[in-house]
Amino acid sequence: MRTHRFAGPMAPARPALGAAFLLLAAAAPGVAVTGMVLEAAPPHGGPPTEGMVPSSPAFVHYGLIPRIHTCEGASVSPPLDILGIPAGAASLALIMADPDVPSSALPVMNFTHWLVWDMPVQAGEVHFAEGARPAGSTQGAAYQGPCPPVPEDAHRYHFEFHALDATLGLPSGANRAALETAMQGHILETATLVGLYDRSIPGVD
């Protein structure tokens, strides 16, 4: 099984994107300005250029997720593209989660924001339109946009994709534990896209 975490051998520390950081970062290398918002470059570089590669037209890897996709906007799921899915993959599964909990406001371990499975793979690709999931897929937890507590630092939102050698046939509404159990022994490759959101700084519309 091949796994891309996109973050090197160790996960990066939780990013601090408060107002002071943004002011200091204005003249720093590796920081891009998008409108009124500064986006820190990925701490361990961008996603890999080979194997399964997830991306979004809405945000870059380790970039800020636009407000429309969060609880401060319409909480519409972002568009997503997954390329380079390995040969032999019969379906794709997605687990979107926030690893930066528990917190004082949300005492839940690794909060689940979205579950989708049995996505058909066509020519090694799967695509999500904004506000939708691929035709033929099954959904567990419906999409819940990022909504980190204020005044905490930015939370990371992991869009973790699993290429599977089978379809799972789980019923709609199955929970994360059931999905993870069903995937055991079927994962060909895993790749993760990470987006950030911080409600204490101006968002990207």
Image (cartoon, rainbow, N blue to C red):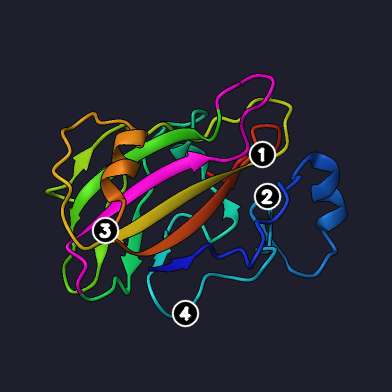
| Quarter of the figure that contains the N terminus | bottom left
Query: For residue 94: magenta?
Result: yes
Marker disc for residue 49? 4
Left/right of residue 114 with respect to residue 183 in the rendered view? right
**Distance Cα–Cα, label 2 vs label 4:** 27 Å
Q: Amino acid at mark 4?
A: Thr
- Residue numbers of the magenta segment: 88-108
Q: Mark 4 vs mark 3: which is more N-terminal?
A: 4
Amino acid type indicated by mark 1: Pro
Which numbered tag is attached to residue 159?
none
Establish if 119 lies above or below 180: below
The x, y position of residue 122, in whole percent, is 16, 68
Which x, y percent locates residue 200?
70, 32
Sooner in the amino-acid sequence: mark 2 or mark 4: 2
Which one is earlier in the sequence, the residue at label 3 or at label 2?
Answer: 2
The residue positioned 21% from the left and 67% from the top of the image is: 89
Q: Is residue 46 left or right of residue 30?
A: left
First-in-chain label (3 vs 1): 3
Q: Gap in Å between the C-alphas at discs 1 and 4?
A: 31 Å
Identify the amino acid type marked 3.
His
Q: Which residue is mark 2?
A: 37
Mark 3 crowd level (few <14, some 14–19, many ≥20, 10 Å Cα): some
Q: Which residue is mark 3?
A: 186
Dot 1 corresponds to which residue?
202
